[in-house]
Amino acid sequence: MSDDLAFRRAVDELVGGADLTRQQRDLAVSMFETVVGLARSDSEILDLKLADTALKEMAEAFEVFRPWRDARKVTMFGSARTAPDDPIYVLARDLARHLAEDGWMIVTGAGPGIMAAGTEGAGRDRSFGVNIRLPHEQGANAFIAQDPKLVEMRYFFTRKLMLIKESHAYVVLPGGFGTLDEAFELLTLLQTGKAEPAPVVLVETPGEGFWHAWMKFVEGEVVPRGYVSATDLAFFRIVSSVDEAAAEISNYYRNYHSARWVGDLLILRLQRLPDEASLKRLTEEFADVIVAGRIKATDPLPPERSTGAFLDLARVSLRFDKQHYARLRALIDELNTF
């Protein structure tokens, strides 16, 4: 028996003893093969340590978030250097409290500053923390420390993955390199369709101008050079109050619920289905991003039925071009008018 065949059988035996679906078993076997392939490739110890730590961090985070997978979550980004008496700290705390009272859970980086404001406002029971271990910081803030919904991470890239992956809306408050990096990466993921469609709210205090100055740079330098399209500015909204921020988030989910791909069909799940005349109008309005066919009502498709995913919701389907995601955002805004 060849070494590869013996390995495959050994892995099959290990995985076969677990209560897994066929797809889960296939993916588990693939992960084993990847890890062994990495070890056999004469990788440096540092590379192996990086891969090992990253996988462990993701596994721990998945475990923490799993019981709350169906809960709506908002991730709040912002500076760790913001003082508790700063008006933007107060605004962040009050916004987190408002969202928690509306049923949302708040995810932050668990550090000081804006992250502490979000956790303080939401309260421990409605908060998650994804902390980064840094030599010059003391660890998680007191509002989330020792909580079972706190994850400690070594790498920024695994931390950013969890801060974005688990949430359904994002609030970005003023901050430095880290906050701006998170804002730009989030917008990049939405622009390229690598993140689920979601609202992004850039929050500043009245008259402060932090995001308006940033917007002036984007509109004055980035858009004219063709680095992003003017339509891509629809991915976010700049606001300066708790009510505006909360309204932007809640309105995004007024009718739209979620999306998934089934083959080449994009399925948009809705609370209320537009009538046929409205669907015809939407098809004409968004014909530029429909590859073929039209926007039409549909029942849950077999892959959705197999997982039992939101079978009670209405649905529309379209063959979206997988390119102009700002137009998809505009379509969701239109669906939210029904």
Image: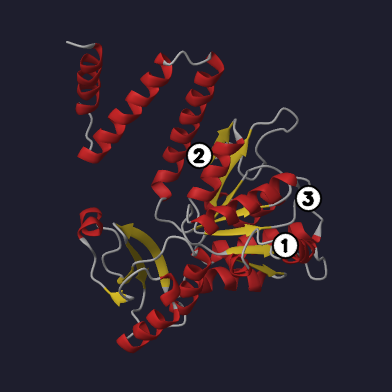
Distance from disc 2 to disc 3, alpha carbons, whole Å, reads: 26 Å
Distance from disc 1 to disc 2, alpha carbons, whole Å, reads: 40 Å
Taking 73 as reference, is 330 above or below it?
A: below
Of residues 22 and 214, the one drawn nearer to the viewer in this rendering: 214
Percent position of residue 263, x then y: 28, 57
Percent position of residue 22, x then y: 20, 38
Quadrant position of residue 212: bottom right
At 37% from the left and 19% from the top, the residue drawn is: 36
**Residue contact between numbered discs 3 and 1, judged by CB atoms under 8 Å:** no
Percent position of residue 122, x then y: 60, 56
Of residues 80 and 176, the one drawn nearer to the viewer in this rendering: 176
**Residue at which label 3 appears:** 82
Percent position of residue 112, x then y: 72, 44
User: As drawn, is 207 to the left or to the right of 14?
Assistant: right
Query: Which amino acid is tagged 3?
Result: Thr
At 35% from the left and 84% from the top, the residue drawn is: 280
**Residue contact between numbered discs 2 and 3, judged by CB atoms under 8 Å:** no
User: As drawn, is 54 to the left or to the right of 211?
Assistant: left
Taking 68 as reference, is 217 above or below it?
A: below
At 40% from the left and 81% from the top, the residue drawn is: 282
**Residue at which label 2 appears:** 148
**Residue at which label 1 appears:** 218
Of residues 121 and 308, the one drawn nearer to the viewer in this rendering: 308
Query: Which amino acid is tagged 1?
Result: Val
Query: Which amino acid is tagged 2?
Result: Pro
Asked whether residue 153 appears in the rendered view, the answer is yes
Secondary structure at numbered mark 3:
loop
Question: For the residues carrying marks 2 and 3, which lies nearer the camera in this image?
Answer: 3
